[in-house]
Amino acid sequence: MHSRVSTGRFWVVFAFLMALFMLAGCAGGNKQSEIVPADEGILRVGVSTDYPPLIYKENDEIVGAEADLARAFAEYLGRKPVFVEIAWENQIDALKADQTDIIMSGMSVTEERLYQIAFSKAYFRTG
């Protein structure tokens, strides 16, 4: 059982790490649902909605663990989350082209990706 203090601490650490990721990441992309201009009031979240339970569509709504984390992070920043659907292979390009502010699609850290973008400290591990 987790106390409210440790849960609160998790969100503070998560928000800090995500802010570092956002500041360090540079990217852009191609195939996306719409181009959303940068704005201080929004957080443009690049998603590929084909990776349940992390990020997927249910009744035309983007849901999953990454969607929940993106909404919480945007709230922490005082911004409105705007999900920008981008084909998986174009996520990094979209970030580098400043079409998104952050990628929240279960992207794992690889050596090749580290040469292109910065990652937060891993907050989820698989396999």
Image (spheres, helix red, strand yellow):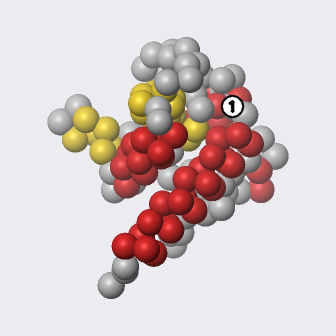
Q: Quadrant of the N terminus?
A: bottom left
- The kind of secondary structure element at disc 1 is loop
Left or right of 105? Residue 94 is right
Q: Residue at x 47, y 45 (%)?
A: 76
The amino acid pointed to by label 1 is: Ala
Q: Is residue 13 above or below residue 52?
A: below
Where is residue 27 drawn, in percent x and y? 69, 31
Residue at point 44%, 66% (across, down): 8
Q: Is residue 43 left or right of residue 51?
A: right
| Spot occupied by residue 77 in the image (x, y as percentages of width and height) | 51, 40
Query: What residue is drawn where x is 53% and y is 60%?
Result: 12
Find disc 1 in the rendering and name its residue: 27
Q: Position of residue 51 (x, y in %)?
A: 40, 50
Question: Residue 29: x, y in percent?
Answer: 61, 25
Name the outermost residue toward the bottom. 1
Q: Is residue 31 visible?
A: no
Relative to 62, is 15 above or below? below
Q: Is residue 110 above or below residue 33?
A: below
Residue at the far right in the pictured view: 115
Q: Residues within 10 Å of mark 1 (few under 14, many from 20)?
A: many
Using the image, determine if residue 104 lies above or below residue 39: below
Q: Residue furthest front?
A: 5
> Left or right of 72: which side holds 57?
left
Q: Name the quadrant containing residue 108.
A: bottom right
Q: In this rendered view, identify the residue nearer to me: 41 or 113.
A: 41
